Image: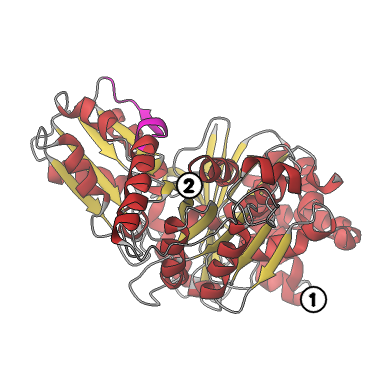
Amino acid sequence: MIEEIIISGFGGQGVLSMGKILAYSGLMQGQEVSWMPSYGPEQRGGTANVTVILSDERISSPVLNAYNTAIVLNQPSLDRFEKLVKPGGTLIFDGNGLRKLPTRTDINIYRIDATEYAYANNAAKIMNMIILGGLLKVRPIVKIENVLKGLKKSLPSRHHHLLPLNEKAIYTGMDLIKKIN
Amino acid sequence: MNQHKKEITLLKGNEAVAHAAIRCGCDGYFGYPITPQSEILETLTELEPWKTTGMVVLQAESEVASINMVYGAAGCGKRAMTTSSSPGISLMLEGISYLAGAQLPCVIVNVMRGGPGLGTIQPSQADYFQAVKGGGHGDYKMITLAPASVQEMADFTVLAFDLAFKYLTPTMILADGIIGQMMEKVVLPPYQPRRTEDEIKKECPWATLGKPADRKPNVINSLRLEAADMEKLNLLLQSRYREIEKEEVRFEEFDCEDADYIIVAFGICARICQKTVQLARAEGIKVGLIRPITLFPFPTKQINRYADRVKGMLTVEMNAGQMVEDVRLAVNGKTIVEYYGRMGGIVPAPDEVLIALKTKFSNIES
């Protein structure tokens, strides 16, 4: 099994940390993992993205030209990565602020309005966990118990009291995500 | 030492260098922050090794100061290192040449970014020439290790110190922004204590640790005003480089045995090209990959071995074509050697390399 994921959005949306949590989750279930961020100027306010690979075998290239799964959180990311999803793959998008929706018919497309939910519920800081929950509903690539183990490992212990809140966010995301094609 | 216990962990390449340095008994780190390698200094500062192993971690006022602090520490037989990225390494070159001339062991990590000039902060391999062809003045060489994974960032930190002290030469780890910034699983090396003063005196009889009554003073210097003396030093250095070429070549091969075409790539490009090899083979094109791990000494013979057997070779580099010159020298006209690369911080994708291979060798049949 190899899962090749791109997560892309604005800097500050929690894209890199969502990828980190996924990578830690893979580590917890004994997989090979790679996490490759865009660390350029885009990280500082423009679009940020991270490539995460979870694999049962040794990972060759951490740099990819096509993905099983793309999670896009803004229009530039959708425009850039929709075409790079492999046929039969999965595209998850947050509908906030999109002017042009995805159009492909050979991939599975899901919408998750996590930004809207997060603002309505004053929960901007767990928005990325809501989206991660949505991903795990449609692509159960890591077990939730391993996500929680991974979170515990990646978060400093002073933040461990927030673990239940993050777990709840995962389930919220599972309810929010909707298939649109 | 509880924080250093052996376990599989997820680290950035830069973080792996910091952990490995502490664990392999490094005595002193001197550096100045620059993207994309600032996490090395940051991680060292977070780990506070001065409280555990006694290792010094110092943010110097500049790269020039850093490399000269390394010179001072190395002159005392200490395991000293510095890290930087391309523009910072350019500033250090005078010091590196002095270290080579004074036969001082040390470790220098270059996490390359796009140049020339201040360039960009994105990954690049454009300092290949600088690392393996000199960079600084005079006839010197540095052992140059090119890691292609986070694990190797850790392992090569340990190896680089061993080689530096074995051959009394500055040793460089030539990484790039991706290897520095990406996270992968890593098993950290076992903990070795720092050498005691007595151990250093035994291992480094040349070190300036105080003169006992029964010997002449040790002098650390690269200046020989007498030309004959200077030539003698040069001959000594050259004989050492020949020995390094004989003993220390490291490389890796993938699917070369039946290959019609061989890609030669180092560092992150070698990882990218492993995927290219898979893509090509899925189409029935027999492609192999040679990955030089040491860039000096270069795996010349190992590449030459395939020159008669393949229809062509392609180097893939994040620069304008630098290693391609060494591959051409290695095959010595026996086969065609093409180059494909991206510059200025752009990273080639695996399918892009396959297209380049097909374009350069238009007679490819699958």
Q: How is the image coloured?
A: secondary structure
Residue A32 rendering spot, x and y as whole percentages: 60, 36
> Which residue range is magenta in the image?
B245-257
How dense is the environment of label 2, judged by Cα within 10 Å: few (below 14), some, or many (20 and up)? many
In the rendered image, residue B201 lying in the magenta stretch gets the answer no
Q: Please name whichever residue, A180 or A100, is drawn nearer the observer in this view of the structure.
A: A100
Is B253 drawn above or below residue B158 in the view shown?
above
The residue tagged 2 is: A62
**Cα separation between marks 2 and 1:** 36 Å
The residue at the point 51 percent across, 76 percent down is A46
Is B291 drawn above or below residue B98 in the view shown?
above
The residue tagged 1 is: A122
**Judging from the image, what secondary structure is the residue with disc 2 in?**
loop
Chain letter for the residue marked with disc 1 in the picture:
A
Which numbered dot is residue B173? none
The residue at the point 41 percent across, 34 percent down is B250
Chain letter for the residue marked with disc 2 in the picture:
A
The residue at the point 48 percent across, 42 percent down is B167
